[in-house]
Amino acid sequence: MTINLISDTITKPTPAMLEAMLAAEVGDDVFGQDPTVNALQEKAANMFGKEAALFCPSGTMTNQIAVKVHTQPLDELICDKDSHVYQYETGGYAFNSGVAVNLIDGTNGKITADQVEAAIKPVHDWLPLSRLVVLENTANKGGGSIYTLDEIKPIRRLCRQRGLKLHLDGARLFNALVETGESTRDIGEQFDSISICLSKGLGAPVGSLLIGDQEFIAKARRFRKVMGGGMRQAGYLAAAGIYALDHHVERLKEDHRRAKILGETLEALPWVAAVRPVQTNIVIFDLAPPLMADQFLNEMEKQGILASPFGPATIRFVTHLHFDNDMLDRTVGALRAFRP
Ligand SMILES: *Cc1c(COP(=O)(O)O)cnc(C)c1O
């Protein structure tokens, strides 16, 4: 069987998840009448100690709606240069919200309160207004790196003092929390809005949640609709989300354990130049010259192992629900046997 380390988005519902989906009670969610969607939204809001939540088709949509609600045109958002909201959302901050972006040169996808403070612009007619800070936890392009609460709190304090909103792109937030042991409530206190993906490590087929206070979510509902994200009998998808939150959070530790073994294996190999620190389920490594990403990936593909290039000589592996111990053994074997 092919081993797919391209992304944790490739997972398919397990038989038990499918059963939960089939058993879902549904209604028309555009009218707010899908009981399963409502249950998922209430569950998510409660987990984070927030008033409300909104089920959306994707994490791009939840991030884009958050930027839209928190800003006005001619504002700017501040984020790390490698952020998903900047790199991988088709420039939507400009298209949907008419805002500028102020990029911080962070470390492993993470920024500090000092860096944010230095980035906040003074108020002049000729400058965009610094209005929103977006943090990503875990940081995807940063190699799955984790923000601890101790790192988030000073950023929160600064945003409060300076009147900026703070949004969390928590596409892989649960990957962070199972490692730090911190709670969803602790995280909820620190942010004005939170986006989480159900379709990454949690293994649901589709769906993300946007979480915040009542007023924020009421506005978010309108933007979801205008973006075409109002779904009708979405309860079948929401049921997968509820199942994922109940059954697929703790097991993320398994993905991390396997990712660490891949990282350690790579570190010992002569054709690997550097491996980013492996904190969760993402392993990013640079190949030693003259080996290039496409050459390496072609060879791996012949062994039935798929991964993605993350630069001309950089590779990303992502572990997930369908990457088991046998596949780990096969991958370690193939890496050790590989000769450039
Ligand atoms: C995957 C991801 C998203 C959302 O992606 P969708 O594919 O639109 O659901 C947002 N942020 C990060 C960090 C991600 O990895």
Image: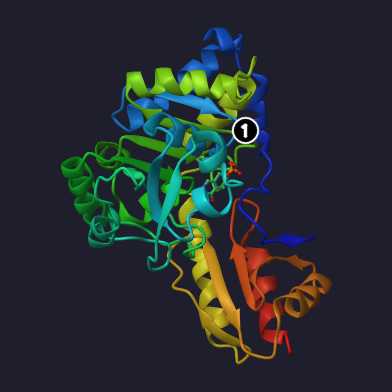
Q: Residue at x 56, y 12 (%)?
A: 34
**For mark 1, what is the residue?**
17
Q: Quadrant of residue 337?
A: bottom right
User: Quadrant where the N terminus lies?
Assistant: bottom right
Residue farthest to the front, as pictured: 125
User: Is 238 located above or below residue 173 in the figure?
Assistant: above
Can residue 179 be spotted in the picture? yes
Q: Is residue 39 left or right of residue 203?
A: left
Instruction: Out of 75 and 82, give the one closest to the viewer.
Output: 75
Element assignment for label 1: helix
Task: From the viewer's perspective, tell me whether residue 310 is left or right of residue 244.
Answer: right
At which x and y percent is residue 57? 60, 31
Taking the spot 66% from the left edge, 61% from the top edge, the residue there is: 5
* Residue at image point 34% right, 31% down: 47
- What is the x, y in percent for residue 191? 30, 39
Q: What color scheme is it?
A: rainbow
Quarter residue 56 falls in = top right
Residue 188's x, y, as percent? 29, 37
* Quadrant in the picture for the C terminus: bottom right
Give the residue type at disc 1: Met
Left or right: where 225 falls relative to 169: right
